[in-house]
Image (cartoon, grey):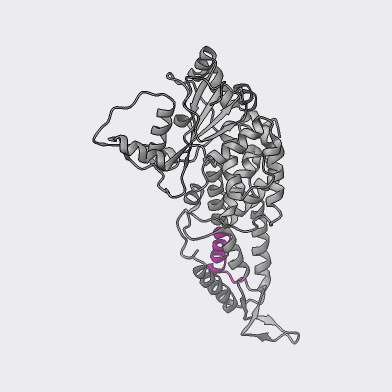
Amino acid sequence: MDTAWPQTWPTQAEELHTFDPKGDILLLLGRRLPEDITDDMNCLLSLLSSLNGAEEIESSSEDTEVASAEEAALPIEPFEPEAPELGFRLHQTRPYSPPMPSYSSSSSASSDKELESRIQQVQMRVSSKHLILASRTFSTMLNAFSEGRVLRTEGKLTLPLPEEEPDVMIIILHIIHGQNRKVPRQVSLDLFSKLAAAVNYYHIQEVVELFSDIWIEGLKKNPLPTSYTPEVLRWLFIFWVFRKEDGFRNMTRILQRESDENLWDEANAVPTIPASIISTLQKNRIEGIKALIQVIYDIINKYAAADTLCDNDQSACDASVLGTIMKSSAAMGIWPQPERPYPNLTYKAIVERIEEIQFPETCVLDERRYISYGSIHPNLHGIKEVIGTLIESLENNMYGLELESFLPTQDKERL
């Protein structure tokens, strides 16, 4: 055992990562073994609590309720800690927690051994000075709350981080401690999303910025999404966390135009996307679809009136135009007028269907001034041109969101 290992700390785990041999903080995490796929966070909390020397909780025969689904909701703003009376606990204040099933607290020595066989202890020895300098979250915790008092009084601290994935924290802590050669230059999109969540929570964008740029460029060797795929939401979150204006605008433009009413549910799969972003995207989508529907209904009302609009004074032509628009609107699901939030409709799909409308050429005069009937005319009496101009005027509102509108005040000045 390391002679500098504090006697009050838990026994060194089999998996120990030393970022500073003289570090005064021991982070306690758990690595779930591959054969166990059950996400029982209560078990993990229990194990880390015992490693931290906490008093054993009295057994109970009833199942204990744990985090509810509401606790996994998207936060509206990045985490800003407030002073709790009983100290600052990362696992209590983190805005996102994975779903946790109920867990019976009645246990025995055999069940404790089973728990330890499913979750491997991971310890990380780190420097409080590095954490405080790099992270606003750690700075607040280690200066203003009970953890800071313990650190100042005893000169050392054990800190459970039950929600963190060890592989993510290893990369983050290498960066914080200046061990750049140990930081990977390439990461998968899945790992990058997890890193972005940690960076956002600990407020270390500036510290990680160099590597985030490298990771983005590496992933961009495969073209970024140009239409709505599951990757779009992950890229949206990454571009928001690392303050990439163009990327953020492009991903939000795709979502405005191609998402449907299920965007909220789909966004829940990417933790900590600010709710203000998703709500604005949904609002813009709804308003865009509403405006498109209004364009078509204005033309329907115009041609349904008593006046003849045909340049050749042919009422049959007006009737043909009216019927074509109404049947096309019914085919695309906007006639009769649907109710908000316009289920199964996307802005882009409606625009494409409108552009495909073909008007029958019922009254076009040939060069001998005879009226011909029955063929198809793509822009009869300029109707398509009028529709195209109106739709083009709507496009400015569907060009994506501005990143600055969704940043904390202290970060807007850094753009």
Q: Is residue 160 magenta?
A: no
| 225 to 357, vertically: above or below | above
The answer to which of 258 and 63 lies nearer the viewer is 63
Q: Which picture quadrant has residue 42?
A: top left
**Main SS category, magenta section:** helix
Percent coordinates x, y for residue 77 in the rendering: 54, 34
Percent coordinates x, y for residue 2 in the rendering: 56, 25
The answer to which of 107 and 2 lies nearer the viewer is 2
Percent coordinates x, y for residue 101 in the rendering: 36, 43
| 262 to 50, vertically: above or below | below
The answer to which of 403 and 230 lies nearer the viewer is 230
Q: Is residue 305 magenta?
A: yes
Which residue is at 50% across, 35% downward? 14
Residue 285 appears in the figure: yes
Which residue is at 61% across, 24% downward? 127
Q: Which quarter shows the C terminus?
A: top right
Please report the bounds of the magenta region as a residue range.
292-309
